[in-house]
Amino acid sequence: MKRRLVCSLLVGAALSLPALAQRTTTQLEQGWRFSREDKPGTAAANFDDRKWSQVTVPHDWAIYGPFSFENDKQHLAITQDGQKEAMEHAGRTGGLPFVGVGWYRRELEIPRDLGQRRVRLTFDGAMSHARVYVNGQEVGYWPYGYNSFYFDITDYVRPGQRNVLAVRLENKHESSRWYPGAGLYRNVHLTIIEPIHFSTWGTQILTPQVSKDYARVEVRTRLSGLGTLRSGRLDLEALLLSPEGKVVAREQRAGYFGPESVDSVFRAGFDLKAPRLWDIGQPQLYKYVVSVRHEGKLLDRDTVPFGVRSIELKAGEGFFLNGRKIKFQGVCLHHDLGPLGAAVNEAAMRRQIRIMQDMGVNAIRTSHNMPAPEFVRLCDEMGMPLMAESFDCWKMPKVPNGYNLDFDEWHERDLVNLIHQYRNSPSVIMWSIGNEVPEQGHAVGTQLAYRLQAICHREDPTRPVTNGMDNPIEVLRTGMAGTLDVPGFNYRPFLYDTAHKVLPQGFLLGSETCSTVSSRGVYKFPVVRKSMAKYPDHQSSSYDVEHCGWSNLPEDDFIRQEDNDWMMGEFIWTGIDYLGEPTPYYSEWPSHSSLFGAVDLAGLPKDRFYLYRSHWNKEAKTLHILPHWTWPGREGETTPVFVYTSYPEAELFINGKSQGRQKKDLGVKIADTENDQSRRDFVRQRRYRLMWMDAKYEPGEIKVVAYDAAGRPAEEQIVRTAGKPHHLELVADRSTIAADGKDISFVTVRVVDKDGNLIPDDGRLLKFAVSGAASFRAAASGNPASLDAFHLPQHHAFSGQLVVLVQGGTKGGSATLKVSAKDLPTASLQIQVK
Ligand code: GAL
């Protein structure tokens, strides 16, 4: 006997869906207890955890510090960076105490009338080696800390009684190349569902035909638990909702299932006229709503947002979105949120994406691991394309206790979860299967690349697959680069041409580029191009002339991307600074966070942000001068002035005296500049930045006047020598935040003189107090060598600035942030919590 599934459909109706009691999902945020002790019996239901600390999840146990070079001190050679001998690495993983065991416990409410319903726990990510126990019994294990996973815990729960969930996490020493975070740093969800229900991530929405007049939408939805159906008919209803929430579904498909089926797939197809296409900055999101009824009773309903858009690769041209060629102006981003550590927070993620959009970024690479679901949803909702990456290593280690130990057993499950979870997200435009894996020089590497790519194609035939490779010669020799849909090259742009000539694809991606280093507001003299430069203050120059041994300056990539049609674009390392990897200060404690970002760890733009903005952001004008102009003691000394601007030409004035006009030199080409002399003379830079190398410092003001293409004055900017520190200036990114207990206002604090000029070297201690409807959450200055704990209400300014994070409570009202400092009047700012 065959059970027949009948699919019925409403077309053109306004949507009013009945409340759904059948599926309940609770985000488990409150009520957790936490301990770093690892005692036998901790998983038991009756274990006494009353002395443990009370925490809210998402929770990163390590971000509270204290910083110490003893935390995960690594003694090894970073071979990717060219190190031949083992050496001491102090702040490589952030100098924070993430290594070791942590336990979380809380009660679960399981209704007395659970009946035949199923109970499921979903972890968006748990760092790491999660062992999950319910009422003392182990229900599952998941080693990889970045992935989402779920367990059916029905057989372990006691309906109507006390149920205890316990999670043991363990991070090994020398298991990461950066700060990974620790604990239940992403959300945990409890779902109760009917025995017949839509499977987790069980829907796949395909748009095989997309144009501006028509799109075909094909859907496959997996139903679980059909084996429990004894008799009667199942009705399935599928709706497509437009971005405004109107029903626009037009077609239906019925499915047939054999008597033995446990899981089955329901298929439907829809024709959409004049579809609203998802695009960069145009986040048009449709919804697919699917319901299943048994004898008229609603069993389950699932809502899956998706986008209609096309992606295509063309030899000689690269990547096309909705038929339009896109060159990636991309950034690599780590998952940490600076002062919040790895603990997921939507406001902080949204701010990151907003800042990147302002820089002109049109794609993010989630290096080198799966992103949080909130991050992907925000990219869907904000129109930001994503390259979702999975692994930093395969079988061969980069660090002794990394994912290499789990790869064989887990890689397929990890990749499948990533793809199933995000395959309907329009923002995800490419999968990446790895980053600089040591297998690049080995035949087995090519086989593994082939295998991982095949898993991606099997689970999602619609997206291309790439791999970030930093060994161009070897990956051409072994065939790894030729195997991939998109050959992704990390660094060494001077080899792009050679690779392009021999590769079959007809295009190349700069999957990781640049690695220029700089510290916000810090300038080094003389201004010369340097590789791996170190200074006693542990900073790098914000003239943007310093890079790593394997890397280069932004313009070395700009020119390759612009002058080669077959280059698909680039993903710079990195958009924003992250915790760990303080290269080039490998052993120099207290350096513990990166200097690679165009934006610092606090989210404040460095000068480099404006260089990218001037080149990438075509919607806004950029005119930015550096350095600051407060240099007591440098009077008469050469103090070059750079201007990052979208205008073609500008004139510099020092105290009213013209220093001459400079024009971007568009005659600079790749071939003539591939030599040390050109590099030393900043020849490529002259095509993208304006530089007055001989400017002499004298106190007063520097003014730049920009000229448009017709040579007319278009805009000007002035930077003045600062006087004495006079007051604090407070500026909130958002002055009204939600009363959900999570939303954050990011307040920039600046130490200024009486006229509002920034005191550019001020590093005084600032103290914070928040009263009313919000509380102090954290502070950060962007100083990669600061040992101030982020969560304490005091922090030293860096280059005259820092950022305070004010978190709204759950009740509406007004909140006041007060910032005080020695010798300055206390400043305050109001924030509304609604
Ligand atoms: C790359 C690597 C990144 C980061 C970067 C620093 O080789 O993929 O994770 O380490 O170097 O320049």
Image (cartoon, rainbow, N blue to C red):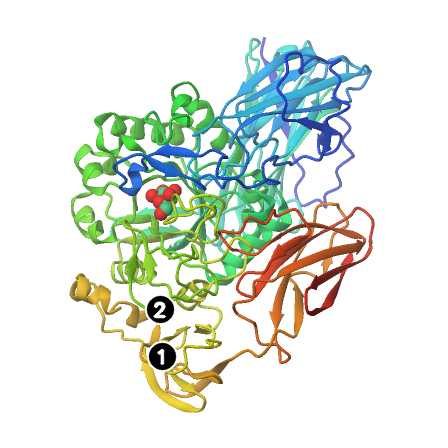
Tell me if residue 400 comes above or below residue 374 in the rendering. above
- Could you tell whether 264 is left or right of 178 in the image? right
Identify residue type, mark 1.
Glu
- Dot 1 alpha-carbon crowd within 10 angstroms: few under 14, some 14 to 19, many 20 or more: some
Secondary element under disc 1, as helix, strand or loop, is loop
Q: Quadrant of residue 300?
A: top right
* Residue under pointer 1: 637
Residue 525, numbered label: 2
Kindly identify the residue that appears in the image at 37 percent across and 83 percent down. 636
The answer to whether residue 834 of the structure is visible from this angle is no
**Residue closer to the observer: 558 or 212:** 558
548 versus 727 height, above or below: above
On screen, 668 above or below 413?
A: below
Secondary structure of the residue carrying tag 2 is loop
Q: Is residue 683 above or below residue 451?
A: below
C-alpha gap between disc 1 and disc 2: 10 Å
Q: Amino acid at mark 2?
A: Phe
The image quadrant where one finds the N terminus is: top right
The answer to whether mark 1 and mark 2 are in CB contact below 8 A is yes
> Residue 37 location, x and y as percent?
63, 22
